[in-house]
Image (cartoon, rainbow, N blue to C red):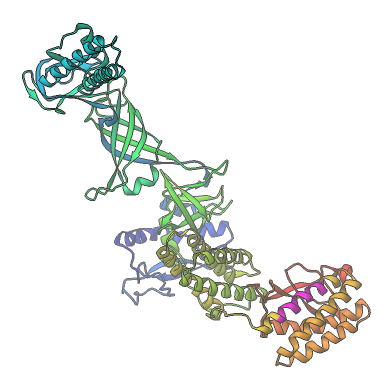
């Protein structure tokens, strides 16, 4: 037994001010019948006693409630009525279900950082001594090509001398008659130029060296990019080795903002998404950045993921290291004009992805009924609704928990008190068509269960679609009173289970949802005394042969309904030929009945004679379909015309529920009714 938390007990006790008035005014307004007083327990609402006393479970004093006895006029087991006073005390508010494009707002924190792609270093290309620094402090703004330092390097001095000598050799031997000698000195000059270039001299510096004809004692180092000096690693007079860093320069016109996002928010963040943020230094000013990178690794300590924004900072307002508060807003994806249904986050009583919502009946203020809905993602202050509601319905956005508590006190299905089937002994006689279709649903559930336990996902999808279609066919049967409300409750729960199974992405999730589906379908079996059933094996030879007879029979039935004598004679011959193949396989009295009916069928010379023989064939074939079973046939329905054969009535088989009377044809084509479904076509 699940006991409500303490705060629920308080709500229930406070709600006693509301419950006694439930039903009086509202029921009078809506003609909901008289109410009778019962005594129940706030902790165990299933206790319903006619007199005051103590709860036999927890021994708390029972409380008086008003029991709504208007079951025949209710539209749901979860329906309840509040008068005006009760609505005010419960602070009930309703809002319409609308379509829209709500967004998910994700909040993150982080800091401003350098753009690593815009950070450059000035390093020593050769070993030497730093004799002069033109930029001698961090924070200096420099431009690309600006002189930064002078370095004295014996290695660089030697390389300059080698180039000067090589250039002189080229001049000396340009008039030489030896091609080999001229090519050698040219290659030597080129090698000397490349060596200086690799040691850090620019092309302009090399040209100046050749023009002057003398090596320089010092070489100037230039800034490779514009930006701010963020680090100075040397001082004048220091000796540096090759590759030693001298300056670090960063371009602050483009920055990164590195944010920390929780795992649960990751689905709301995508590359290219615009994110707004603010900083403490400029309150009220909104900055913008674009998501350029989402870290593929989760931090094990903080359970967060790094999200990086690219930010333009041409005015220099943002400084690396600044603390940032960011908001990412993701609009719901919309395909064309198909906007999702939205309800406030306060409307559903959430128990996972499925939830309970209370809606107000149209033009009946104060009359509420519960609906189970399948929720989509939460988007800001709204939930998307995948199924269970339609646009324009009024959902309870405040006071819904109190409504659920009141329904719980009356021992009806609620969030805290789930539906339980009462059992077959509580119901009246049900339509045969409904029960026969229910048997088909039962067989389909057996197949669905087998495929799910085998883990066959490919076979499971079409079975779920078929199960959903069967539920749709059975959604509004010819039931009445309490039985109709019970069935509607069951269909609502089963539909939700099937939708969740269709959306499940893992085997573990499918097994968890199937457990709920199996529990709900067990209630169906208990309510309507259905057998658990077993998965059917391969079809027998007789079932296949009988299926061929039934298919030919349908052709005959359509020909008779169309008053087509030629077609009826041809179809009668086909039926009789198919019967010859199935009769040896039948070891029942039905074989003799089918044989006789087939012979009379082909002996008929006109439509009246064929129709006379058609009736006993229909009776025997109906019994064979039920007793033996068929394979290779779609749905088989038994239909009945009360006016056939002098108002004695006659049945026939059809492949759908549409009435096409084979006994009267065009004279009374639509005369008749569907009795039951003999075969579900699975």
Query: Which residue is drawn at the image coordinates 11% and 27% (left, top)?
Result: 241
Between 56 and 298, the residue placed more toward the observer is 298
Between 296 and 101, the residue placed more toward the observer is 296
Magenta stretch, main secondary structure, is helix
255 relative to 91 in the view: left or right:
left
Does the magenta segment cover residue 475?
no
Between 63 and 525, the residue placed more toward the observer is 525
Residue 78 in the image: above or below residue 586: above
Residue furthest to the left in view is: 237
Query: Which residue is drawn at the image coordinates 7% and 18% (left, top)?
Result: 236
Residue furthest to the top in view is: 212
568 relative to 508 in the view: left or right:
right
Question: Which quadrant of the structure image shows residue 60?
Answer: bottom left
Q: Position of residue 79 (x, y in %)?
A: 51, 61
Question: Which quadrant of the structure image shows residue 157?
Answer: top left
Magenta-drawn segment: 545-557
Q: Position of residue 234 (x, y in %)?
A: 10, 23
Residue 122 in the image: above or below residue 617: above
Instruction: Name the quarter where the N terminus is drawn.
Output: bottom left
Does the magenta segment cover residue 549?
yes
Q: Position of residue 134 (x, y in %)?
A: 15, 14
- Say if residue 15 shows up in the picture: yes
């Amino acid at each position: 037994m699940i006991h409500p938390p303490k705060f629920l007990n308080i709500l229930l006790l406070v709600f006693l001010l509301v419950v006694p008035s439930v039903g009086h005014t509202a029921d009078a307004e809506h003609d909901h019948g008289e109410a009778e007083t019962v005594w129940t327990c706030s902790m165990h609402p299933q206790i319903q006693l006619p007199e005051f006393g103590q709860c036999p479970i927890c021994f708390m004093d029972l409380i008086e409630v008003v029991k709504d006895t208007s079951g025949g006029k209710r539209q749901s087991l979860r329906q309840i009525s509040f008068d005006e006073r009760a609505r005010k005390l419960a602070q009930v508010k309703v809002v319409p279900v609308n379509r829209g494009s709500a967004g998910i707002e994700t909040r993150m924190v982080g800091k401003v950082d350098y753009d690593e792609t815009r950070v450059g270093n000035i390093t020593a290309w050769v070993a030497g001594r730093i004799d002069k620094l033109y930029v001698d402090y961090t924070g200096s703004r420099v431009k690309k090509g600006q002189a930064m330092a002078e370095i004295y390097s014996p290695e660089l001095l030697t390389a300059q001398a080698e180039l000067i000598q090589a250039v002189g050799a080229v001049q000396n031997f340009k008039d030489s008659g030896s091609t080999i000698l001229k090519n050698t000195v040219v290659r030597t000059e080129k090698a000397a130029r490349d060596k200086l270039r690799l040691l850090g001299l620019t092309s302009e510096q090399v040209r100046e060296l050749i023009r002057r004809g003398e090596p320089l004692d010092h070489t100037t180092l230039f800034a490779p990019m514009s930006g701010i000096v963020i680090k100075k690693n040397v001082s004048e007079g220091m000796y540096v080795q090759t590759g030693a860093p001298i300056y670090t320069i960063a371009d602050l016109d483009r920055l990164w903002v590195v944010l920390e996002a929780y795992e649960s928010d990751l689905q709301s963040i995508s590359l290219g998404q615009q994110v707004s943020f603010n900083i403490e230094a400029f309150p009220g000013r909104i900055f913008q950045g674009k998501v350029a990178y989402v870290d593929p690794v989760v931090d094990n300590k903080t359970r967060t993921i790094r999200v990086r924004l690219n930010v333009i900072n041409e005015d220099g307002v943002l400084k690396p290291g600044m603390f940032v508060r960011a908001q990412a807003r993701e609009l719901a994806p919309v395909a064309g004009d198909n906007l999702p249904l939205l309800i406030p986050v306060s409307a559903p009583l959430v128990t996972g992805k499925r939830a309970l919502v209370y809606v107000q009946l149209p033009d009946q203020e104060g009359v509420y009924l519960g609906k189970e809905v399948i929720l989509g993602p939460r988007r800001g202050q709204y939930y998307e609704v995948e199924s269970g509601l339609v646009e324009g319905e009024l959902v309870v956005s405040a006071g819904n928990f109190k409504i659920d508590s009141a329904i719980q006190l009356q021992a009806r299905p609620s969030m805290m008190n789930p539906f339980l089937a009462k059992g077959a002994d509580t119901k009246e006689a049900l339509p045969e068509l409904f029960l026969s279709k229910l048997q088909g649903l039962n067989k389909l559930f057996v197949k669905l269960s087998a495929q799910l336990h085998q883990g066959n996902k490919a076979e499971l999808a079409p079975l779920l679609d078929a199960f959903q279609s069967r539920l749709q066919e059975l959604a509004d049967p010819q039931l009445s009173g309490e039985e109709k409300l019970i069935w509607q409750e069951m269909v609502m729960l089963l539909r939700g289970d099937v939708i969740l199974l269709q959306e499940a992405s893992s085997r573990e999730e499918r097994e968890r949802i199937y457990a709920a589906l199996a529990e709900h379908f067990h209630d169906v079996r208990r309510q309507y005394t259905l057998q658990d059933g077993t998965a059917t094996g391969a079809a027998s030879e007789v079932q296949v042969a009988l299926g061929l007879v039934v298919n030919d029979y349908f052709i005959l039935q359509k020909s008779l309904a169309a008053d087509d004598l030629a077609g009826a004679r041809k179809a009668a011959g086909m039926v009789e030929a198919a019967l010859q193949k199935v009769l040896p396989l039948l070891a029942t009295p039905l074989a003799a009945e089918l044989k006789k009916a087939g012979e009379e069928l082909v002996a008929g010379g006109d439509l009246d004679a064929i129709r006379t023989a058609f009736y006993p064939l229909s009776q025997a074939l109906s019994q064979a379909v039920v007793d033996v079973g068929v394979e290779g046939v779609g749905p088989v329905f038994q239909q009945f015309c009360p006016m056939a054969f002098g108002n004695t009535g006659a049945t026939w088989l059809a492949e759908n529920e549409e009435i096409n009377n084979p006994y009267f044809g065009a004279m009374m084509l639509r005369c008749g009714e569907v009795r039951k479904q003999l075969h579900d076509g699975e």
